[in-house]
């Protein structure tokens, strides 16, 4: 899957478990998301980013706020 203009970042974290929680919360709301791991594997720094379609951005952010993830 290539990152195109119709996919927007809604969440990022340096902890993979936080990304998994956010993905699960969005999945419960029938929002498709995918993650891009930008962590450097040698030095363990950087972030993992979570993307949703542009049409779902506002809903996704509201859901993440309701669950105290943003």
Image (cartoon, grey):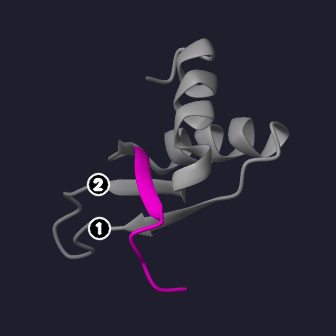
x 36%, y 43%: residue: 13
Q: Residue at x 62, y 45 (%)?
A: 56
> Which residue, given by chain and number where applicable, does mark 2 sit on?
47
Q: Residue at x 38, y 68 (%)?
A: 37
Residue depicted at 43% across the width and 23% down the height: 70
Question: Residue 8, labelled with which disc?
Answer: none
Residue that numbered label 1 is attached to: 38
Q: Secondary structure at mark 2?
A: loop
- Is 42 placed above or below 57 here? below
* Left-right relation of 45 to 31: left
Question: Is residue 45 positioned above or below 58 on the image?
Answer: below
Q: Earlier in the sequence, mark 2 or mark 1?
A: 1
Disc 2 vs disc 1: Cβ atoms closer than 8 Å?
yes
Locate the N terminus and report the quarter of the image it occupies: bottom right
Q: Main secondary structure of the magenta part?
A: loop
Left or right: residue 51 compared with residue 33: left
Question: Measured from the top left, where is residue 61 in percent x and y?
Answer: 52, 30
**What are the residue bounds of the magenta stretch?**
1-10
């Amino acid at each position: 899957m290539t990152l195109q203009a119709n996919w927007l970042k809604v969440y990022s974290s340096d902890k993979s478990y936080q990304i998994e929680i956010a993905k699960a919360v969005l999945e419960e709301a029938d929002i498709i998301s995918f993650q891009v791991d930008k962590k450097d594997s040698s030095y363990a720094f950087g972030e993992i980013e979570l993307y949703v379609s542009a049409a779902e951005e506002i809903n996704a952010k509201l859901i993440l706020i309701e669950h105290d993830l943003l």
